[in-house]
Amino acid sequence: MSIPAANHFSRHYTLEQARALLPEIRRWLALLETCQIKLDATEEALAVLLAKNGDTGGELVNTLVKTVADIREVLEEFASRQIQVKDIERGLIDFPSWRNGREIFLCWEKDEADIEFWHDFESGYAGRERV
């Protein structure tokens, strides 16, 4: 008699549940993209000041700290739901799920209209298969 492997996640999504979250996930990814643009601009402005031995305190540092906090807040939305963010820039997201009695990921990228793929934990993105 074989002993089933321990679950990696306490939360699992059906395909329908994961699909229902896509509008909210798209919004979170858009927020992350906006934050990343702001973060890049702020870091560039700080680098210019540092190169000139200028004052790096004040508004730029406040913007940097606030932007990092905003990014963390959005990432916590994913983490609290045990949804995996594999690549922020690509918007590559994995939802823990079950398929034929084993844990898998439902896999989605922000440019895809719908969740159409899954993969097991071992093969990752390269092993994506149609749902």
Image (cartoon, rainbow, N blue to C red):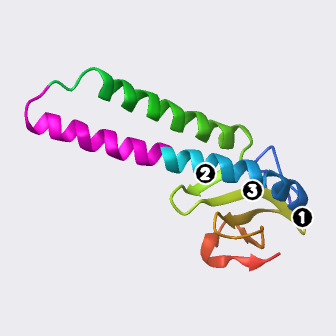
Q: Tell me the magenta residue range.
A: 35-54
Instruction: Name the dominant secondary structure of the magenta segment.
Output: helix
Residue 71 locus on image (x, y percent) = 52, 38
| Residue plotted at (76% across, 55% down) | 22
Residue extending furthest toward the top: 58
Q: Please name the amino acid that badge 1 sits on.
A: Gly
Give the labeled residue for mark 1. 101
Residue shown at 8%/30% (left/top)? 53
Question: Which of the 4 image quadrants contains residue 121?
Answer: bottom right
Q: Residues within 10 Å of mark 1 (few under 14, many from 20)?
A: few
Q: Mark 1 and mark 2: span between their CA atoms?
A: 31 Å
Label 2 crowding class (10 Å Cα cut-off): few <14, some 14-19, many 20+? many
The amino acid type of the residue labelled 3 equals Phe
* Residue 45 as seen in the image, left or right of residue 17: left
According to the picture, the residue beneath numbered tag 2 turns out to be 29
User: In the rendered structure, which disc, 1 or 3, sits on the residue that comes first in sequence?
Assistant: 3
- Numbered badge on residue 12: none
> How far from the left and from the top, in percent, is residue 29?
60, 51
Classify 76 as above or below 123.
above
On screen, residue 71 above or below 108: above
Could you tell me how far apart the alpha carbons at marks 2 and 3 are, in whole angstroms?
Answer: 15 Å
Q: Residue at x 61, y 53 (%)?
A: 85
Q: Position of residue 102 (x, y in %)?
A: 83, 63
Q: Which residue is mark 3?
A: 95
